[in-house]
Image (cartoon, grey):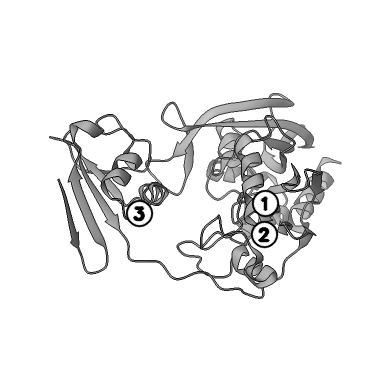
Amino acid sequence: MSDSCSDSENEILTFLVEEADAGKRLDAVIANRETRFSRSRFKSLIKEGHVTLARPEQAERTILEPNQRVNVGDRLTITLPPPEDPAPKGEDIPLDVVFEDDHLIVVNKPAGLVVHPAAGNWTGTLVNALIHHCGDSLSGIGGVRRPGIVHRLDKETSGLLVVAKTDAAHKGLSEQFADHGRSGPLVRAYQALVWGKLKSKKGTIDTQIGRSQHNRLKQKVLKEGGRQAITHYQLLQEYVTEGECLASLVECRLETGRTHQIRVHMAHIGHPLLGDPEYGQGFKSKLNKLPQDLARDIESSKRQALHAGLLGFAHPISGKELIFKSEMPQDLQNVMNLLQKMSI
């Protein structure tokens, strides 16, 4: 039994979970009941906080994980927001194109540029720039707001990103990213400046990562219920002054691709990224040990010291293995130079 109503803008759906759906995933149950929208649409709505669950004699709560299992008698409430703005338009935003052919384009994304339109960033994104640059040649598989997008970088993470221009290229690239390089040539390496001295020069972080219940915009390491996240890291350089290692340059290679994965993992082992406004708050006292100009640069940048400097994959059409490198952007290079001067 289900009900539908409207609060002038949002459509509200409510229904009780029946015995046939007991033990199933939340997103699957909702999609089976409400067939106007895809399961992926409901998965997004759940992650965005638009679905609540109330159990007998328990308070109603917002569910943020699509894989939440439901019980008989659970009352589900889904808030359907009004339709979003239409397809994004091309904007004349400069692009640093590293490689381009008829099938794909590799760009060097600057920090501060959002990859695709979303709440709070409907314009001025990489997608808007790509539509202007590529015209109608972008792959449509990614959807209206994410044409050609195969993988993403956080807004304040700089570096290499590949975008599909044809559906065939999108399919081939997506398969490689889904495999995470376990059986193919895909490789993604990031350079990160982190606080402190690592206990080991290299290692692997293997945890479950999921959305924080306290702040849905943040991710966290979970004991259970998250998705497996694997990061391999290796020390590249230490910055030592007066016998103390204040910061380290680390290379991180991803075996999975979870949201904020490197930022969460490095903070989890006690070495958050310099400048990270979300996961490095506890290390602000470290700034007091730096020269004023360096501390000011790090604090005023408002961006984590993370750069996607290496990207390799097989061309989805020709099969040729391609590898691209990007030097550290000037803002992070300046921080490295000042850290190096302190170490002399």
Q: Which residue is mark 2?
A: 165
Rendered position, 33 above or below 101: above
Q: Which of these two is toward me, 168 or 113? A: 168
Q: Check whether the beta carbons of the residues at disc 2 and disc 3 lie within 8 A of each other.
A: no
**Under tag 1, what secondary structure?**
helix
Q: Which residue is mark 1?
A: 169
Quadrant housing the N terminus: top left
User: Quadrant of residue 250 in the image?
Assistant: top right
Q: Which residue is mark 3?
A: 37
**Under tag 2, what secondary structure?**
loop
Q: Residues within 10 Å of mark 2 (few under 14, many from 20)?
A: many
Quadrant housing the C terminus: top right
User: Quadrant of residue 260 in the image?
Assistant: top right
Q: Residues within 10 Å of mark 1 (few under 14, many from 20)?
A: many
Q: Check whether the beta carbons of the residues at disc 1 and disc 2 lie within 8 A of each other.
A: yes
In the drawing, does residue 344 fall left or right of residue 279? right
Q: Residue at x 69, y 57 (%)?
A: 297
Task: Residue 144: give x, y in percent of width and height.
Answer: 51, 63
Task: Residue 40: give x, y in percent of width and height.
Answer: 42, 48
The CA span between labels 1 and 2 is 7 Å
Q: Say which amino acid is labelled 1.
A: Ala
